Amino acid sequence: MYIQDTFRLTLLIIILSVVGLIFTTLMATSLRRIVQSKKYKKLDRQRRFYRDKLRSALDKGKVSQNMNEFISSPRSIKFQAIEDVLFDLIEERKSTGDIKKLFKRFGYITHYEKKLESRDIITRASAIDKLGRMSSESSADKLINMLKSENPEIISVTVRALGNIGYLKGLRSILEILPSIYEKWLITRRTLGTSILKFGQPAVPMLLDYLKKTTNTKIIAIILDVLSHLYDKNSLPFALCYLEHEDAEVRAKALKVIETTANGTEDSTKAKIIPLLDDPVWFVRLQAVKAIGSVRYKKAVDTLGALLFDENWQVRNAAATSLTKFEANSIDIFLRALKQKDVYAKQSICEELEKTNFISRLIENLNSDSKEIYEKSKEILKIMHSLNFSTPLFEYLKRVENGKIKDEINFILGKDTKA
């Protein structure tokens, strides 16, 4: 009996303890929410107040006269509110130079530079990110030191921050550590490429110089991808050198550079793309197709026509899209392709003709002075109609004013017997 009473008492104590713990936890959570709610409400009020204040002061050029109104302790809600307002103003205003200077004048740069010395990785990473968003060039050397870290988060956020600042010394430091970054997988390729791209046009000479020195295929691919977005003609000779590279991704990225820089160059340069249209790797063929369309190399039209039946659907669609850029020169190619038996391929071609609005050109050709262009365009439209790609014809019919085109569309749709 004594043992049973003791057991019951012990069980009761345990139950009450658990209930008490749950109650305490719920109370603590509720109190924390109440405190946080009050804090955020106050922060929102401060943001609204200082947003109006700063806008007015900036518009009137009176920030310097009212400096004391905006300087506060880093631990205060006011400090956080003004920081948020400054970031918002950067987003909404075209001229951001004056706003960026205020980060330094109000003490934010100094505050976050001190945070770089923190042992806490989250605190340090946040400080690096903030300094990058503030475009603090004076902090660049301190941020470069952060590249010595082996923590992936620190490396990643530092590379992004240096890209936001656009300090070329920062790019040089990033390039120096690229091999170790890849060896240890400290950063994603997407982050690296996006960050390097932010350095903009001034980075091109440094990137081209780096290409001369590196044999790392992954790094070469990333740099070529960045160069393809910077549209610099000086990149073209380098890209041409990589067209026969053993790595498929390097070939594809080289073609991407050519796509954006080779327009207007001699045919001998454009002709170097053609062998890549027969590359064994589908995404290389895809990029070659896009490059041919971009540089408008007419001698490749027949080869593009063959790719309308490529084994890869993306290559097929891209071939159709590129062919539409050659206008009348591609009509024969499309007509031959649409007379083939492969219904799926023909449907894909029709989809691209609709998507690229090439069908509008075909409809306008129904009034062409050239009998050949008129007849071939009409035949393509009839085939498209037979494959149920008729919507553009119906839509065009609603707004067409040209009587001849209207009669031709009605004939194709079977609404009229007039040829």
Image (cartoon, helix red, strand yellow):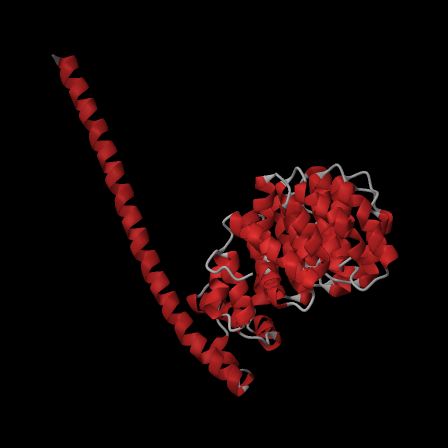
The percent position of residue 233, horizontal first and vertical second, equals 81, 62
User: Which residue sits at x=48%, y=79%?
Assistant: 55
Q: Is residue 79 left or right of residue 326?
A: left
Query: Where the C terminus falls, by quadrant?
Result: bottom right
Q: Is residue 27 left or right of residue 300?
A: left
Visible in this render: residue 161?
no
**x then y, percent, for residue 125:** 58, 52
Q: Is residue 32 left or right of residue 350?
A: left
Q: Is residue 318 above or below residue 343?
A: below
Report the front residue among 22 and 366.
Answer: 366
- Residue 362 position, x and y percent, is 61, 61
The residue that appears at 79% across and 42% down in the rendered structure is: 216
Q: Residue furthest left?
A: 1
Report the quarter where the N terminus lies: top left
Percent from the top left, x then y, of residue 115?
Answer: 58, 57
Q: How many marks?
A: 0
Q: Nearer the viewer, residue 259 or 345?
A: 345
Q: Is residue 274 visible?
A: yes
